Every structure is written in C-alpha cells, then in structure tokens.
Amino acid sequence: MTADQFFSLFHQYGLILVCAVIFCEYMNLPGFPAGVIMPSIGVLIAQSELSLLLTIVLSVICGIGGSLVIYALCYWGGEPIMEKVFGKSAKFQSFVKRCHEYIDAQHGRGLALCRIIPVLRTIVSIPAGLIRMPVRWFIGWSALGIAVWNTVLISFGYFFSEKILSML
C-alpha cells in the first residue's frame, strides 16, 4: 500500500481505517509497513480536524489488539501451529530460544524493548505466546513499547506534514 492510496482511503473512512490498518500491521500482515503507514497517519491527522492524542491512544489500543491475536494463537496453539507455519526451521527455533532468553533475563522489559526494534517489534508476540508469558505482563510491556513506537512515528508525520507533503 502506498502513501497516496492510504491518503485516499483515509478521506473516506478516517479513524476507522487507522484502527483497522494498525490492527493488521501488528498482526504482521504483509502490505502494512509501519514506516509508511504511521507517518502517513500523522500527516493525515495534521491535515484534518482529528486529535493527535486520540489517534495515538487508538493506535496503541489497536496495536495491542493485533499483537494479542498472534500472542493468543501461540499461547494456546503453541508449537504445533508454529511447526505448521515455519516447519522445523533451525533459524526459527533459534530465534524463539533467543527471544525467550532475552525476555526472561529482562523480566518482561525485554518485550517493551523489542517493540521499538523494526521487524522484531511485530513478531515478538510469537515467542511471548510460546513461552506463555503472563497476559498482564504481555499487555503492559507491549503497551509501553507500542506507545513509544507509534508516538514517535505518528508524531513525526504530524509535525513534519508540510515538509512531507511538499516532497510528494
């Protein structure tokens, strides 16, 4: 999805579209890159009468919701689902093991840190579910990391909207 396509859809659907896209982005669905979507949301909010703060709050809620879907699938489906999706990939098994060790060593803080690292930020829900991290920890630490990531990217688009639009 390009920024122009997203702008066009935003004018039709507003915050409903924002919520749906962020939910899908945190479920790690292809076609929703945060580096394009989040700043675009900020630009659109700056050009509309919508609230930046409300948009960020909704983005965090929808990000947690999308992350919870992946977390729940891994928590209750566990290894059998992951083996069907990734096979017996040594690379994936190594990734899960490293994430597990990191999250355990950081007592949950590692999850918040993973949420601000590109690529890792959306797939960290997988090992969190596989290791059966307590849901309150998962939501709390995820909310912190998601809030930082979304606030930075959406605010960037919002505060630099004029510069961004002049480049299009």
Image (cartoon, helix red, strand yellow):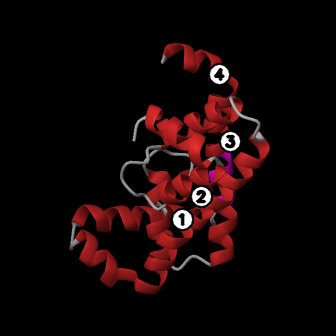
Q: Amino acid at mark 2?
A: Gly
The amino acid marked with disc number 3 is: Thr
**Which label's residue is closer to the chain start, 1 or 4?**
1
Q: How many marks?
A: 4
The image quadrant that residue 44 belongs to is: top right
Task: Work out how far the residue at label 1 is from the one at label 3, CA to CA, in angstroms.
Answer: 17 Å
Q: Earlier in the sequence, mark 3 or mark 4?
A: 3
- Say if mark 1 contacts mark 2, CB within 8 Å: yes
Measured Cα–Cα span from mark 2 to mark 4: 23 Å
Q: Secondary structure at mark 1?
A: helix
Quadrant for the N terminus in the image: top left
> According to the image, label 4 marks what residue?
160
User: Which mark is drawn over residue 63?
Assistant: 2
The answer to whether one can see residue 100 in this image is no
Residue tagged 3: 151
**Is 116 placed left or right of 88 in the picture?**
right
Q: Can residue 66 be seen in the rendering of this structure?
A: yes
Region of the chain picked out in magenta, as a range: 143-148
Location of mark 1 (residue): 67
Q: Say which of marks 3 and 4 sits in front.
A: 4
Image point (75%, 41%), residue name: 50
Is 2 situated above or below 98? Answer: above
Q: Residue 123 in the image: x percent, y percent?
A: 44, 59
